[in-house]
Amino acid sequence: MSTPKFRIAICGGGVGGLTLAVALSRYPDIVVDVYEAAQSFYEIGAGIGVWPRAFKVLQKLGHDFEQQLLQRCGYEFTEKYVPAIKYRKSDQPAGIQLFELMTKGDQMRFHRADFHGVLLSHLPPSCTTHNGKRLKSYIQPFKHRSRNSPITLIFRDGSTATCDVLIGADGIKSAVRPCMMRELAEGMAPNQKQSVLSCIDPIWSGVTAYRTLIPAEKLRARCPDHRVFRGGIIQYLGKDAFFLAYSVSLGKYINVAGFTLQRDLVGTAYEADPRIPRRSFEGKANSEWVGELTAEQFVEPFKNFEEEAKLLLECVERGTLWAVHTVKTLPSTNFGRVALLGDAAHAMLPFQGAGAGMSIEDAYLLATVLGHKATTLDTVPRALAIYDKLRRPFSSDVALRSRLNGQLCALQTNAPLHKLGNTITKNWEWAWLTELDDALEEAIKLVEDSSINIS
């Protein structure tokens, strides 16, 4: 192999980090190192959902890649309109059917370990993976004579490494983001500096998630013709709380995910204003995000729901509680030769199932600008600025749309019930009616024409 044009370090071997590594395999003159904090790349977690917009990006990684994903998904990708979610107003003795969401194409759902396995099997020889490497900080040279000198990575085990470009794909608790925010804040006026530094730590969004699996046989014994057995996702809406249910594991279990929303906190979940008072979850430290629940604790927020919903909840044996955290809207996702992608850049509320798709889109556009023949070590900062210009406004908009979706489902807006279906559909249809291609074309244009101002 000829001398590489630069070496990229990707911190984080999740969906975004590995997608970036695979996307960069089209450019053999780029050497990639993936550093993962865990001892294994196989993520825990039940599943990952990808809407048509993001799945079309995955298709760009090659026919074999797509076919391996489809084999693990169990159904074909379609662009026909299909029923997706049935919504009911359930916080009353007799619930009512509100509407059925129709989407242009299915959400493609995978087990996380399966999805990771496909990504890992497509990593190129030019990519080296390193496990058990949790980043502590990095040092980026800025003096004129050394501005292209390697970036030094410092890991928590005391080891170090170097790279020319650093991509933080290390999730909501990113170690790259604090270092970058401190670099950005350097030399700013006190108020502006305080705002930037307030983006370092994730914050509790005001949303609490309740998750469990119900044995399908247990529900079938109580109610053999329950609506959830007819397929698709059922969403039971109530004031300030709602939950959804659907079959998983080939019908062996019913997945139940519930949410409660505290209005004041949800409404300011992305505000980078340190003057806005925020509290941690139930007075606990921000590191305590997950807890165990008894059956009684799990059903408490939904105890006044309709009979159909109660039949499901009566089958709950135990569950987990998650304090859903977000990242404030960042002033930038790049600085020098360092950039953030995925949850490290824009961890958002889960109400449009968009988090994985956003990471995939980030990764592919980032690979496009870094891999372009016009991008050199000298012009990497411009390439990353192009990425930021095209992705940050879009991901910020999706974050706001996801929040609105949650507020609509928790009946916290002024939207009349008879217009709820149209409001939710219009707010969400970006995920199946738009594509990344326009942004990719714009990115290539900006890379190739350095005379265009991107500030």
Image: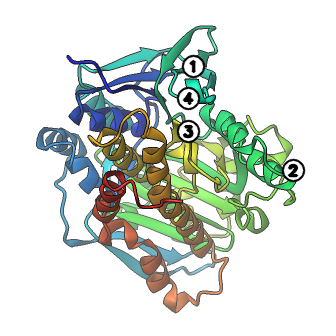
Residue 358 in picture, x, y percent from top left: 43, 53
Question: In the picture shown, does residue 150 fall above or below 333?
Answer: above
Label 2 – label 1 distance at C-alpha: 29 Å
Q: Which residue is mark 3?
A: 336
Q: What is the CA distance from the residue labelled 3 to the residue labelled 1? A: 15 Å
Q: Amino acid at mark 1?
A: Leu
**Residue 220 shows up from this direction:** no
Mark 4–mark 2 distance (CA, rounded to whole Å): 27 Å
Q: Earlier in the sequence, mark 2 or mark 1?
A: 1
Indicate which label's residue lies in the foreground, 1 or 4: 4
**Looking at the image, which residue is at 38% across and 75% down?**
101
Q: Secondary structure at mark 2?
A: helix
Give the mark nearer the N terminus: 4 vs 3: 4
**What's the amino acid at mark 3?**
Gly
SS for tag 1?
strand
Q: Which mark is residue 190?
A: 2
Which is nearer the N-term, disc 4 or disc 2?
A: 4
Instruction: Please rate how many residues cluster around mark 4, counting C-alpha atoms within 10 Å: few if below 14, some from 14 to 19, many from 20.
Output: some
**CB under 8 Å between discs 1 and 4:** no
Sequence-wise first label, 2 or 3: 2
Percent x, y of residue 265 = 76, 62
Dot 1, how many residues are within 10 Å of its Cα: few (below 14), some (14-19), or many (20+)? many
Towards the viewer: 267 or 371: 371
Q: Residues within 10 Å of mark 3 (few under 14, many from 20)?
A: many
Residue named by callout 4: 147
